[in-house]
Structures are given as C-alpha cells and as structure tokens.
Image (cartoon, coloured by chain):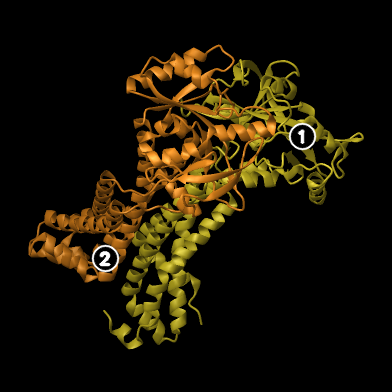
Chain colours: A yellow, B orange
Amino acid sequence: MALPFRYNVLSLFARPTSTASSIALIAVVIAAFAYLQAVTDSAFSTMSATGDPTTIIVLNPSAESETVSGLGKDQINKLESAPDAVRRGDRPIISPEMVAISSAYTHESSDMKLNAAVRGVEWESACAVRHDRVRLMRGRAFQPGVEEVVVGAEANRLYVNYEIGDKIQMGTRALQSFTIVGVFTTDGTAADSEIWGDVETLRDVYGRVGYSSARMLAEDEAGAARLIEHIKGPQVELDGKTERAYFRDLNTNQNATQVLSIAMIVIMGIAAAFAVANTMYAAVAGRTREIGMLRAIGFARVNILTAFVLEGMVLSIFGGATGCVLSLVFHGMRKSILPATFTTVSYQLQITPKIIGTSLAVAAAIGLIGSLFPSWRAAKMKVTDALRES
Amino acid sequence: MTTATLTLKNLGRNRLRSLLTVAGIALPMLAFTLARSFVDGYNRFLQASDNNLRVAVHQKLTFTTWLPQRMREDIETIAPPGYLTAVCRAAWFGGKLEGSQVRFASLGFDRDTFPETYSEWDMTPEEIEAFNRERRGAVVGPALAKKLNWKVGDRVTLTGGVPPFPKAEFLIVAIPAKMDRDMLCFAFDYYNEIVQAATGEPVGVNNFWVKCGSPQARAWALEAIDKQFSNTDHETRTEMESTFIASFMRSGGDWVGLVWTVGRLIVLVAVAVAFNTISQAFRERTRELAVMRALGFSGGYVVRMVLMEGVVLGLIGGAVGVLPLYGLTHVSTIRLPDVPIPVLIAHTTMAMALGAALVCGVLAALAPAVMAGRLRVATALRKVV
C-alpha cells in the first residue's frame, strides 16, 4: 500500500524554514528559466504571428529575405495567372511591395541608430493580403504620390520623433523627408515595427527599378501549398513561402544567446538539484525512526522510496510555481531584435502557458533528480537499525 | 582550538552535506563567471577595435544602401597629408556555402589598402603578395577556417546573399593567425568584375574603412567626412568602428544585457543554496550551541562561529567553481559552440566571483547567526530535535 499523498505534503510543512528556503531557491532558478524562454519564444511568436499560413510571400529565388529580394514588374505580372489564389473580381489579389531601410534613434539608446524597415505598399491590397488585420489607430492613411507615411504602433513607440506630424528622412540619394500622417497596428505582428508609404513614391525615392516582394492570399493551407508549387514551377520560376515559414527561417541568428542561456540554465538546474538533495538528506536523517516505524508496520521499501521522491518533487513544483508567478513581472516587457532582414522588430515578452508548462516540468525534473539519492538511502535502511536511531 | 579549526571540523561532520553545498555554490559561481567573461569579452572586443583607429563611412541612413566607388578618392583628397593611412572599400557579399548552415561574413576589400587597413592582423609579406597575385584570392579568419576545415590552397564556391546573387569561386591564400574575425575577405576588383558581368553595373560600396594615423586624425575624420558630403547626392555617416559593429550586434536584441541579467540572478541561487544548508546545519545543532553558551562561550563568539562557517563554505565554493576555469582560460583558448567570443576569465571577474561567493556565505549565515546569538539557553537545551 502506498503512503497517502497528504503525508508528503504535511511532512514539508513540518520543516517550514528549510522548505521555504528550498522553494525560494527553485523559484529563482525557474524564474530565470522562464525569462530566457520568453525572450527567445516571444521574438519567435512576433515573427511568426505575422506568419499567417495562408498569406504567401513571393521572393526572388536567390533571396533569403525581402530586404535583399528583387522582382521585376514582368515577374509580378506572371502571378496573375496563379490558381488557388483569393481573387477580387476576376483577378487574384496581389500586393507588390518594396522593402527598404531608414534609421532612427530609439528612446532606450540615444547613441546608436537602429535600422527601421520601410515598406512601400498599395494600401488596399496590402491590407487585403493581410486578412484586413491592418487597422489605423490614429490619423489617416497616406496619399499616393505624396511624401507621406504611416508608422506601426511599435515603431511609433520605439523610435524618437515618430509622432504624427514628424518627418522621417528616406531614400538613397538626396534624401527626402516624409511626413507621418497616421499610426497603424496589425495586433502584434512584425509589421508593427515598420513604416509604410506609397509603393510608387518610395520606389522613386529609393531608385528601385522593380519591387522587393509580392504577397498573395490562398483560401486554405492546402490551397497555399498548391499556390506555392505554381510559383516555384516553370510558369513563374520564383520562390514562394507562407509568411509563417518565411519568419521561421529568418529567425536563426540567435544561436549564441541560446547556447549561453542553455549552459547557464543547466548549471543552475544542477545546483538546484543539489540543494534539493541537501534538503531531502536532512529530511531523511531527521526522520530515521519514523521511516523505521513505517517499515515496521508494513510499508515496503518501494513505498518509502516513492514517498520521499514525491516529497522532493512536490517541494520543487511548489518552487517552480512560485518561480512562474515571479516571472510574471517580465510579462509585457519590451525587447527588440534584428533578424536576418537587418531591420529591427520590437516585441513584448509573453509568459505563455507553454512556458509555464515547461518551467514546471523542469522544476519537477530538478525535484526528481535531487531526491532520488536521499530517497534511496531512506528506502534501504534496515528496520531494526532505523528504530534504534535516536 | 581556534574558531577556524572548529569551523573546519564542523564542516567535516556531515561531509556529504558540505560537499553538496560547495557544489551548490560552485556551480552558480561558474555560471556567473561565464556570463561575466562573455560581457567582458564583448566590451574588450569593441574597445580593442577602437585601438585600431578605424572609422566606418556609410550612407547616412543605412549601410545597406550602396555608395559609389569613386568616393574613396574623394575621401583621400579632402584629408590633410598624413591623416589617413588607408581608405578601403568594403562590399558585402554575404556568401553562403552550399549545404552548410555555418554563417559567416564575406566581403570584398580593396587589394591595395586592405593589409594596411587591418594592419593588426600582421599579414606576412608572402601572404600579402599571394592576395595581390591571385585574382580570386581570399583571406580567412583562423577560427572560421578551422570550423569549415579549410586550408590555404583550398578552393571554395559561395553564393552571394545580395542581388545579383552571383556564384563565385575563391582560392584561400592566407589564414593569418592574428585575424580575430570569422570573415572571408576577397578582392573588391574581383567582386566588381562578377557584378559587372551579371548586371552591367559596377558593384556598390557598403562602407569605406578609413584607417587614421592618429587619434586626432580620427576625431577629424568623424566630423569632416560627413560635412564634406552633406547636401550632396550621397550623404554619409561616419562612425567609430565599435559603434558600427555594436549596432550590428546590439540591435540584434540586447543579448549581452540578457546574459548579464541572468548572470546576476544566478548569484541569488548561490545565496539560496548556502542559506538552505547553513540554516539546516545549525537547526540540527541548536542544543550543541546551547551547551556552548552554557559552558561560557559568549553570544558574540557563537555568532562569529556561525558566520565563519558561511564564509568558509562560500570561499571554498567560489574557489572550486571559479579557479579551475580561470586557470584553464589563461593557459589555452576555450570557445563555446556558436559563441564568437572565446571564454577568458579576467582577473577582475575572478575576484568579483570570489567576492560574490564570500558575500553569499555571509548573507546565508546571517539569519542562523542572529538566531544563534539570541538563543535562550534554557529553552534550547530542552529542545528535542
């Protein structure tokens, strides 16, 4: 017969200081772990939140990102015949876009300019291929042919002097000033960090012959696959990706941080397991007679083993839960990254259920590893010796 | 018996516990030094790059916009004699090796001024000669060469990452030992040739590296070049090399800050580990402490004894965690996979970690020490543990 679970929990309360300090320890480790996960995950989720699986982004086959991609008007015209694309009237919706870079100081660091993405679009079709997720929060849309732009909500927050009425310098030769006339949001996608203006006006200012990319829309994921096949096929000979795949592939230059973070987390996890081991060894030593008695009244070695392992795990999970609560202070914190496009994307840290789940699992693992040896010691005690212990 | 020997004997009573505690302090301290050495390495790298007196001149808004090649001569002419020792065009190639996930920078540099621009790499006259002679010659950083198993004389084919995405073959002519960048450098004229063939247009310049003769010359360059080109078709922005590189690295998310934040959190872990054990150890010894007090040891003595235990545990933990790696990094170079900066534990970092470990021990022992000092002898003696 197994020992009741209550026994494990109540035993923890019997040594409040020791239990509390172990919980605090694991909480710190888990909070740090959750923070690191949030930093990497949230960057990823902002990038692939844009990543609609039915929005197709068409690129030059050699280009990895929109910043370096180039498409001629003739190449975009070939997309007209694409099957499985969402149509308006008898023609598929195509949004030819141009991506360029401007730069600006941020509120956080005034000594260094960040690269801001500039996107030339045709407003109506750009909104259409984004499932009409684009919403003006303030001001109005830009006028074609006029030196006006709208800025995303994150760009508006991140960069200095990015308010309605302010001017932004753009272009390659003889820089032009564009006036900000509105602020838009796409509810947390990478576009929120961008500056949008009329594609033809911007092509002129940046001296571009063609476009950077084009976006199209498929009915569903199967349609998207067929559409991509057509784009890559002999009739068009371009590269097509779902936005989700595009952003997933871009988000690859964070290896160094990840390696270091993982190294530190593993080290901290082992230290925490040692601390649990310490606590549990003390618990076992302090309860030798109790263990002897439990054995004497008929509990098997395996019951003792499980009881102590469970106790250690409950302790760690408590600590893990506390750590998760602590990590909520990071929720909503803002960070920015520079993916392979060389343009800054700003995002909010999010402590998601997935992060909480992994954190608790790691806490449980720490508890398991840390309590295994002490529990083993408890289980293999001889009944007679244990009972004699004072 | 002195307090010190008493402390050591006490720690020896429960060897397993002392061992686990030492490990519990040592590991976070190891992680702390790793984090700190990374932050150090990053700053050292930036500082060192400024000792080379190079500035980067790029288009006013972004280095991704090309500047015309002739601006090299413009820069050379406006400089007073002796101010600039080399002006070198740099054009981003961004080549990828087919079937390889390894990312590295590849750029075209002017043949004539490249060795002087990067004079700190100490390229030998033979290497410079080979680079000048071989049309497709490439100079590669030793760490990168090692990773990709490249040797001098190897031919490699890369596909460019920017329009017109040309395929190009290079011949590795030098792997200078002192080259501290994971870069493949080749001749600008070769790149120009390739782009001309593909598009009919000359290749654009992402930035000019301007090597200055003195700090004064650099201060001049930072101001004068931008002034010269203001209100022209090609407005420029001139930056210190460290700013230019840091804007690459830092805007890629503040990873240095991230590592350092976690590095400091880790110290808390060590405090918690030490506190956990020391408080446990003394709870078990409450009666013993009471006996000592009853025998006439002062409250102050008992407090000192408890604190001493914390100090010794902290110091041993710190030493075990930090010293081996500290020694190791000073006799050989250690790299973590995918981390561009080698691990080097500075003397200050080592001292900082030992100090932190000591503080850890003291902080952890504080509560048990106060408890021991306030002990009511009669009650404690009655206590059954």
Tell me if A80 is positioned left or right of A160 in this view: right
Alpha-carbon span between mark 2 and mark 1: 63 Å
Q: Chain of mark 2?
A: B
**Nearer-the-camera pick, B76 or A162:** B76
Tag 2's secondary structure? helix
Tell me if B68 is positioned left or right of A287 in this view: right
The quarter of the image holding the C terminus of chain B is bottom left
Residue topped by disc 1: A132
Residue A293: give x, y in percent of width and height.
37, 83
Tell me if A297 is positioned left or right of B164 in this view: left
Count of numbered labels shown in the rendering: 2
- The furthest residue to the right: A90
Tag 1's secondary structure? loop
Residue topped by disc 2: B18
Q: Amino acid at mark 2?
A: Ser
Residue B223: give x, y in percent of width and height.
43, 16
Mark 2 and 1 residues: CB-CB less than 8 Å, in contact? no
Whether residue A31 appears in this view of the structure is: no
Are the residues under badges 2 and 1 in a single subunit?
A: no
Q: Chain of mark 1?
A: A
Tell me if A213 is positioned left or right of B109 in this view: right
Residue A133 picture quarter = top right
**Nearer-the-camera pick, A302 or B140:** B140
Give the crowd class for mark 1: few <14, some 14-19, many >=20 residues within 10 Å: few
Residue B227's disc number: none
